[in-house]
Image (cartoon, helix red, strand yellow):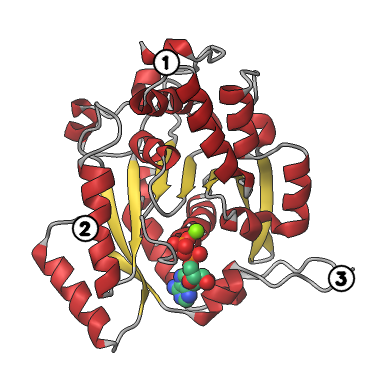
Amino acid sequence: MAFARVMLPMGTLPYEAAVIRRGPERASQGAWTVTRGNGRKGTFIAVANMKGGVGKTTTVVGLAEFLALERGASVLVVDLDQQASASLCTVGDAMLSQLMQGGRTVDAFLKARLIENRDGSLPSRIRRNSCNLLHEGRPVFTSLLPSSPQLRIVERDLLVELTRRGLSFSDIVATLAELFAQDFGRLRVDFDYVLFDCAPGISPLTEVAINASDLVLIPTIPDRLSAFGLYAFMENIVRRGAAPDARELNTKVLFTRVQSGVAQHEHVRASLRAKGQFAILATEIAQNATLAAGIFPDDAPLGAPPVTPTVKQKYGAAAEQYRALVAELVPAQAK
Ligand SMILES: Nc1ncnc2c1ncn2[C@@H]1O[C@H](COP(=O)(O)OP(=O)(O)O)[C@@H](O)[C@H]1O
Ligand SMILES: [Mg+2]
């Protein structure tokens, strides 16, 4: 086996690793939630698109907070982008610097486990129960596994180091997939949802997150360039799949930053829906200045206590769209 060449400290899996492998039995169930032995459910959702600026991070943050708000779900955001946007949105830059210094990031974890062969722990790197939203005076909590700009370097060092040890590219992807199955797989016990904020472009990490996920959510701006990017993404990542056993993935396209009245947006939305090649969600997220400002807040003035916004302040009219997104993805009776 390819993975045997890289030492992965083995632990006791709380459920069968096979449960996160995509298989015909999953497809025949027609469902993307996974019931564990203890009856609780943990679902992996990768939010991905090769294109940048299409609203991946905004979707991750919005979906995380509305899953917590609407379904009372425990949600972990895993930042897999070296730009660390989801991390900045969730804990702010001062706290992120502290977490980076303490090695509490996903890149520090990957470095420890795969480059230095240390037994790096994933749970200890999770920042639990951040609150960036108030609903009816009560805090809405989500958790974060942060990223940092070092992720770019760690990914490169990982390729160099594992190649030096004689692993082929597909061995490296398989090694990462095994790490996901073991370490990230365990997080299904602690969290109802794990949302992966994938980097733009194609990297082994993105491919592995996609292949390990029960649902791949693909935010897409309904313009011509983004539609072109959507076809390229489907072809490169989804249809051809990185892992040799990659099968049909459960993908859903989410139109984001939609501008009604803009001819190109109207045309692209209508034609992609009419063609029926992709599973496109009925819910759409409109272009919305309140959302853009609310998700990436300005730093509070020096010395001032942090101000936690209400749903209305942070999301404005987008709140109803995220509620609809949660209702479409997770019908109320499913939880
Ligand atoms: N629905 C929206 N309305 C207005 N601006 C948006 C919306 N969604 C995203 N944006 C803005 O577009 C930019 C890119 O969004 P982001 O979520 O960071 O995309 P990605 O993660 O795909 O690069 C950000 O400045 C963000 O605030
Ligand atoms: Mg992003």
What amino acid is found at the position of numbered circle 1 in the picture?
Answer: Phe
Label 2, label 3: how far apart the Cα atoms are: 46 Å
- Identify the residue at horizontal 64%, vertical 22% (top origin): 116
Judge: label 3 CB < 8 Å from ligand 1. no
How crowded is the residue under tag 3: few (<14 C-alpha within 10 Å), some, or many (20+)? Answer: few
> x, y percentage for residue 233?
28, 53
What amino acid is found at the position of numbered circle 2 in the picture?
Answer: Tyr
Residue 36 as seen in the image, left or right of residue 220: right
Q: Mark 3 points at which residue?
A: 302
> Is 1 situated above or below 272?
above
**Lower position in the chain sequence, tag 1 or tag 2:** 1
Q: Mark 2 points at which residue?
A: 231
Along the line of sight, the residue nearer the viewer: 83 or 27: 83
Along the line of sight, the residue nearer the viewer: 274 or 199: 199
Along the line of sight, the residue nearer the viewer: 288 or 103: 103
**Lower position in the chain sequence, tag 2 or tag 3:** 2
| SS at mark 2 in the image | helix
**Lower position in the chain sequence, tag 1 or tag 3:** 1
